[in-house]
Amino acid sequence: MKKLYFLLAGIAAILVLWSCEDNNVVNPNGLPNDARVAAEILLDSLHVDSTAEVFVVGPLPAGTILREFLPDATDTTAATLELPVSDEAKYVFFINDHKDLSWSHRVRYAWVGITSGEVEFVGGMWPMLIDHPAGFQEPFDEQGDETLDGVKFRYGTGGGSLLEDPDGDKPGDTLRANNESGRLQAAGTGRKSSVALDAPCKKIGYLFDAGEWSECWGKQGFSAGAMADNAGLVESFLTDNGFTTTRNSQYKGNDIPAIKGGDIAEKLKDKIQSFATEFECPCDGDPGCHEFFLYICAHGEGDVVSLYEPRDPNWGWFKYQDLNNWLNVFPPCVKVIVFLDICNAGSAQTHLEAQCNLRADCGFTLIMSCGPTDSTPAGLGVTDSGTED
């Protein structure tokens, strides 16, 4: 059995924004016109969820560098993005994809040219620092906010965080207010001052055996029963370890609910993604991470996984890149564990390792029963299955 384990860890940081003066007429109830144009270009170029919060600063001159503000204890290299030389006005964006989470978690930094429509961005795990060529530092002065396509944009000038701490020894060493939840988070500590307790972390498992269809074996397949048995073994393991489990089985010979009718792969996607709504961030645990365990036992070839419908020669399929996209809806406070007992399961690694950058402190684990060019035994007769092994 091969196991791939990725864990991203971090501590807390502060939000600091530095910028030059803005020359546009500012609408106190919204974004200035050029900033709004830049925000619309950004939304046309990047997918931004409505749960995100986006800070806008600008226009900024060429040579400005957007830099990941790493805590002192972090030994990684900071992500950077430099504004290139050109005559057009450029606005910069700090996209906080998960504004309700403590650091670290997935964020993005971007600049937009409002004449060319050019957009460049880079991903990071910590707040964004704007290195202005002139080098001055001022508190962030919010002058308007506006919601575009469901995404809240906060426009301002200067730099630093939303509230200035008169006792702080540098701009931005303050409190960052979360207006959505009513909590205050102490910058540099990651501790919430809210007296409300977070909900306990959850452990949820979903098990799916994809079945088989064959005229020669009573339309239920030679291996379908063994796949169902494998899923049952993992379900017992999960329940013994405190997981709440759900199963679907495409095997004709049991009464476990199957996924039927229409596009089986699309329905499987909907089922997997439905569990994402069960998790609220943050949660109270040690560590503070939910767990989602996904088990799939199926036929596969290359990066394609086959799905069958009981009592019907109807089948579907998905690719591991599809599975990666399905898992993207789970918030970073969820540790995701994926166990694939599928021929050529090793093909999944290159497609799913992108989850490591999304899971923040909670991590991602991938268990594969065989390599990318190998077969995994079904567990018939005296042979152990990949799951049993």
Image (spheres, helix red, strand yellow):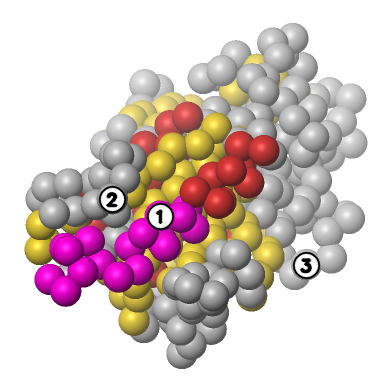
N-terminal label among 1 and 2: 1
Label 3 and label 1: CA atoms lie apart by 44 Å
Extent of the magenta region: 215-231
Q: Residue at x 60, y 65 (%)?
A: 388
**The C terminus: image quadrant:** bottom right
N-terminal label among 2 and 3: 3
Q: Residue at x 72, y 26 (%)?
A: 284
What number is the disc on residue 228?
Answer: 1
> How crowded is the residue under tag 2: few (<14 C-alpha within 10 Å), some, or many (20+)?
few
Answer whether residue 56 is visible to the viewer in this image: no
> Which residue of the protein is positioned furthest toward the bottom in this rendering?
373
N-terminal label among 3 and 1: 3
What amino acid is labelled 1 in the image?
Answer: Ala
In front: label 3 or label 1: 1
Front-most of 91 and 345?
345
Read off the residue under disc 2.
Answer: 253
Marks 1 & 2, CB-CB < 8 Å contact:
yes
Q: Residue at x 31, y 45 (%)?
A: 254
| Rendering coords of residue 214 (x, y %) | 17, 70
> How crowded is the residue under tag 3: few (<14 C-alpha within 10 Å), some, or many (20+)?
few
- Picture quarter containing residue 333? top right
Front-most of 291 and 44?
291
What amino acid is labelled 3 in the image?
Answer: Thr
In this rendering, would 38 be left or right of 262? right
In front: label 2 or label 3: 2
